[in-house]
Image: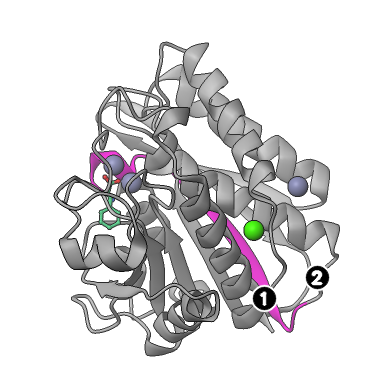
Amino acid sequence: GPDIPVAEVQAHLTELSRIAGENGGNRAHGQPGYRAGLDYVRARLDEAGYTTALQEFTAAGATGYNLVADWPGGDENATVMFGGHADSVSAGPGINDNGSGSAGLLEVALTVAEQNLQPTKHLRFAWWGAEELGLVGSTHYVENLPDAELAKIAGYVNFDMIGSPNAGYFVYASGSQPPGSDQIEKVLADYFVSIGVQPETTEVGGRSDHAAFARAGIPTGGTFTGAEQAKTADQAAKWGGTAGEAFDPCYHRGCDTLDNIDATALDRNTDAIATAVWTLSA
Ligand code: PHE
Ligand code: CA
Ligand code: ZN
Ligand code: ZN
Ligand code: ZN
């Protein structure tokens, strides 16, 4: 996959930060900042030639939205999906959680278009709503997809928090509950090893939007730079950063702003998204 310039990803984060600031300080489900952020992502994809659709659902008495973007071409009977949640908590703008995954996915999708990638498989990107209310958007998508459509999904790869300020380099463990894919775990782990980073696997379990896909029997995986857990001394020795401090001390707090991003982690993980997209769609 191509080397994505991190400045392009940071530019999307700057826009998401501005959008939150102009809409009450967050991008939470049911709040105006959520739709404004999603509309920004959708407009960039539409300009680039994607076929986009909004899927509506209801959660906690408010309308939620998933954004689904298809890159025309490829074998739709073998569709590979890449996604992450687009909503923040209401405490703040959610720049690491999950502006980071949202922006990384967007820039990789735009690079697919710029390079006019023509993969063998069909490519679909998704930005989920209401993850923070309990994986509502992604679960709604999977549960409302007819069995015949579900059978066409060859894999789903999730990106939720990929720029943590005291970053770890985690790949979702395939031997998790619900189980993930050995192949996807290996593609992601091999990428980190190839750039000289030693990843660890982590049991993400039901904590993000891959879960509904995994429960439906679809091969899943993802990357993660850590949330409220503290970095160990061994992890600080191999990855840098501060032992005994959380990977993201601003997790679910108002201080999850543009300052709450490690640009190196964001860069490496966005390049991991690109590698996964290019490799798994080939
Ligand atoms: N899904 C969690 C959140 O949005 C964060 C998380 C991501 C936790 C990946 C574990 C693994 O708050
Ligand atoms: Ca890069
Ligand atoms: Zn770009
Ligand atoms: Zn969260
Ligand atoms: Zn999250």
Say what amino acid the circle numbered 1 marks: Trp
Image label count: 2
Q: Is residue 120 magenta?
A: yes
Q: Is residue 132 magenta?
A: yes
Residue found at the far front of this picture: 237
Residue 49 percent across, percent down from the top left: 82, 51
* Cα separation between marks 1 and 2: 8 Å
Question: Which label number is shown at residue 117?
Answer: 2
Say what amino acid the circle numbered 2 marks: Leu
164 or 147, nearer to the observer: 164
Q: Is residue 30 visible?
A: yes
**SS category of the residue bearing label 2:** loop
The residue range painted magenta reads 119-134
219 or 269, nearer to the observer: 269
171 or 77, nearer to the observer: 171
Q: Quick one: label 2, few (<14), some, or many (20+) residues within 10 Å? A: some
Q: Residue at x 34, y 26 (%)?
A: 62
Q: Is residue 258 above or below residue 278?
A: above
Q: Residue at x 28, y 54 (%)?
A: 226
CB of mark 2 near ligand 3 (< 8 Å): no
**SS category of the residue bearing label 1:** helix
Q: Which residue is mark 1?
A: 278
Mark 1 or mark 2: name the one nearer the start of the chain.
2
Q: Residue at x 49, y 57 (%)?
A: 83
Circles 1, 2 touching at the beta carbon (< 8 Å): yes
Judged left or right of residue 132, residue 116 is right
